[in-house]
Amino acid sequence: MIQVGVLGASGYVGAELLRLLAGHPHFKVVYAGADSAAGQQIAQLYPNLTGDYAGWQFSEMSPDGSSSQTLPTELHNLELLFLALPHGVSQKILPDLLLDTLLPDALPPDTLPPDAKIIDLAADFRLKSPDVFKQWYGQEHGYPQYLEEFSYGLPELFKDQFTHKIAVPGCYPTAAALALAPLVKVGLVATHGVIVDAASGVSGAGRALAHNTAFCTVDENFTAYGLCQHRHTPEMEQAIGAQILFTPHLAPMNRGILATCYAQPATGATLSTDKLLDCLSSAYQTAPFITVTQDSPSTKATYGSNAAHLTARFDERTGTAIAICALDNLGKGAAGQAIQCANIICGLPEESGLSAAGVYP
């Protein structure tokens, strides 16, 4: 069994990691670190985890990267570490976590083993340009020289580029890239004027209490947010290879993302619905978690799984290509995808511990 740790285990993504890892045939959780929930019973905060984590407490961690604090002893022998931390925190603790081939002068004597694999679910190492990171996240990147060391963790598109350090994509960019990247790659659609309209469940905002995600705000409501400035935009553009106008929406549901994407035909391209569907089917013919269908995808069909359901249409009246993707924002959009990446870099079957079957009803 591969010894696994989770930093940020008390958030929704961290809890989903614990749930999926509990049933993994090759990974064994030995550390579940949290900040504000440190010392609290895991089963008290997440009763759904009682069966596998009875008696477990969230371990204390030092998420601020303070040099006066050392890594918990449980981390010293880990082979695999998941970082489910808020944006901006991963780079702060980078000196204590990364391999000596990266930061030989910054490492204290009690670091992770030199062959440890790191899966980061935050945005810290997704973007390759520090200037773009500063523009969209409003802060200087702490370690811009190491952005290239992290692979972008969307297996269906970039698996051949994986290293032992993975930056897992955001949930919105995952859905948009799966729908659009194959069409852009083969030159069917133009790389400008692309529109992504996507709606997410409330869990995408995290566990922290906020007015805009409170029940009375979200229930019976559907609203757009982050207009023209959502920070997933540059990540989509990087993964897809096109200019994107992205508008996210908050839907009154717990989990799920539905991304409806619009693009114009590339110069000289003759499009049809069959051609678009054939392109997607060809791109994902060996992808175990992707289903390309004639039917319109629904978030409910992917609930609790690592699946992504895709379809496409060409509207001859307006000359517009439409590509749609549905997935679970905590599954294929976060924790499930992180485990899929971990399977690959650990040399395991890609599907280990994961399911393409959603929960229904």
Image (cartoon, grey):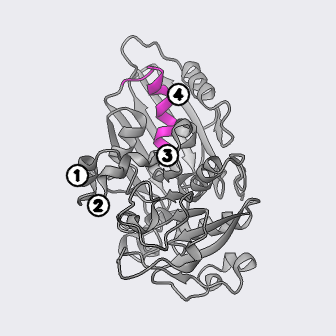
The residue mark sitting in front, 1 or 2, is 2
Q: Main secondary structure of the magenta part?
A: helix
Cα–Cα span, label 1 and label 4: 34 Å
Q: For the residue labelled by badge 3, is the local secondary structure a helix, a strand or a loop?
A: helix
Front-most of residues 301 and 82: 82
The residue depicted at 48 percent of the width and 26 percent of the height is: 183
Cα–Cα span, label 4 and label 2: 43 Å
Q: Earlier in the sequence, mark 2 or mark 3?
A: 2
Q: Disc 2 marks which residue?
A: 142
| Residue 154 sits above or below residue 22 on the image | above
Question: Where is residue 331, by image quadrant?
Answer: bottom right
The answer to the question of whether label 1 and label 4 lie on touching residues, with beta carbons closer than 8 A, is: no
Of the numbered discs in the image, which one, if any, rests on residue 17? Answer: none
Of the numbered discs in the image, which one, if any, rests on residue 313? Answer: 4
Of the numbered discs in the image, which one, if any, rests on residue 135? Answer: 1
Cα–Cα span, label 1 and label 2: 14 Å
The answer to the question of whether label 1 and label 2 lie on touching residues, with beta carbons closer than 8 A, is: no
Q: Earlier in the sequence, mark 4 or mark 2?
A: 2
Q: Disc 3 marks which residue?
A: 174
Chain part drawn in magenta: 174-190
Cα–Cα span, label 1 and label 3: 21 Å
